[in-house]
């Protein structure tokens, strides 16, 4: 089965840039989607197909994908960005695969 | 909108049953999944039912999972049998449109605790 690896946590000061990685074998050949999860709220996709930003998602959120690493970048981090972030791909043998999740801590 | 409902406490070896109610539109054109979040394993896709009634389940849970749909009520359901404490999680229902590879709409999730 396909495995996605994320750092357990990333800490960043307000106004700085947060970078969350998602590692996988040749992940650059796949489409990666990113979700934001906050307690008590419905999860929300913040980036789809590597770098597409759905309507309503701030421009501060961006994504890239190449080689063995996909990256979610959040610029000018705000307190409201504190959440768990998950990457996800579709795999022909495992269907929908998620990374282990990264907790973004805003200092 | 999607809203999960069901018991928040289930005894070990019992069957976990949850329902997702879809409001604001018809259930029929979309595919519907159940996904759970556990402290140790993060998000895990459980299975889905397509708009045509086809089901597909996570291989690791396949022997215990049943997903069904009730079109007249705009609802779909999850049954997970023989639960253990490892099945304690927040359970989400989610929607997928057409052939897109991601879930574009989710419920708020419901916590299910397995405990005697």
Image (cartoon, coloured by chain):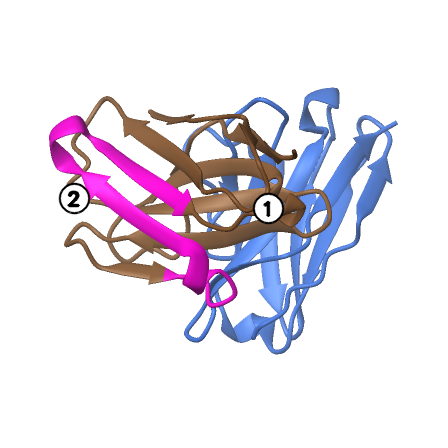
Query: Given the image, what chain letter belongs to the residue carrying mark 1?
Result: B
Q: Disc 1 and disc 2: Cα gap in Å?
A: 30 Å
Chain letter, brown in picture: B
Screen quadrant of the N terminus of chain B: top left
- Please tell me how many numbered marks the rendered image carries: 2
In this picture, residue A87 sits left or right of residue A18: left
Q: Quick check: is B63 in the magenta stretch?
A: yes
Chain letter, blue in picture: A
Judging depth in this view, the residue of A60 and A87 nearest the camera is A87
Q: In the rendering, which numbered label is found on residue B16?
A: none
In this picture, residue A94 sits left or right of residue B105: right
User: Dot 2 surroundings within 10 Å: few (below 14), some, or many (20 or more)?
Assistant: few
- Circle 1 residue: B87
Residue A72 location in percent, x, y? 65, 49
Residue at image point 68% right, 52% down: B41
Residue at image point 65% right, 33% down: B116
A36 relative to A98, above or below: above
State which mark lies toward you, 1 or 2. 1
Residue A98 location in percent, x, y? 57, 56
User: Dot 1 surroundings within 10 Å: few (below 14), some, or many (20 or more)?
Assistant: some
Residue B94 location in percent, x, y? 39, 40
Judging depth in this view, the residue of A46 and A5 nearest the camera is A5
The image quarter containing residue A41 is: top right
Q: Are marks 1 and 2 on the same chain?
A: yes
Residue at image point 64% right, 64% down: A4
Q: Which residues are magenta?
A: B57-79
Q: Earlier in the sequence, mark 1 or mark 2?
A: 2
- Circle 2 residue: B29
* Label 2 SS: loop
Specify whether residue B10 is in view.
yes
């Amino acid at each position: 089965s396909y495995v996605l690896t994320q750092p357990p946590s990333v800490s960043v000061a307000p106004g700085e840039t947060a970078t969350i990685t998602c590692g996988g074998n040749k992940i650059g050949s796949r489409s990666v989607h990113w979700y934001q999860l906050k307690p008590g709220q419905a999860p929300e996709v913040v980036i789809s197909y590597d770098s597409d930003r759905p309507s309503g998602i701030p421009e501060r959120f961006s994504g890239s994908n190449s080689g063995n690493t996909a990256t979610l970048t959040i610029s000018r981090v705000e307190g409201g960005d504190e959440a768990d972030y998950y990457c996800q791909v579709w795999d022909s043998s495992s269907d929908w695969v998620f990374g282990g999740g990264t907790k973004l801590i805003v200092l | 909108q999607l809203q999960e409902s069901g018991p928040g406490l289930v005894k070990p070896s019992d069957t976990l049953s949850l329902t997702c109610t879809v409001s604001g539109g018809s259930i029929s054109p979309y595919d519907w999944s159940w996904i759970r979040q556990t402290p140790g394993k993060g998000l895990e896709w459980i299975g889905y039912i397509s708009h045509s009634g086809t089901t597909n389940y996570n291989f690791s849970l396949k022997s215990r999972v049943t997903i069904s749909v009730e079109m007249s009520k705009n609802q779909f359901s999850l049954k997970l049998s023989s639960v253990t404490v490892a099945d304690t999680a927040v359970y989400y229902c989610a929607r997928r449109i057409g052939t897109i590879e991601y879930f574009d709409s989710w419920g708020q999730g419901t916590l299910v605790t397995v405990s005697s």
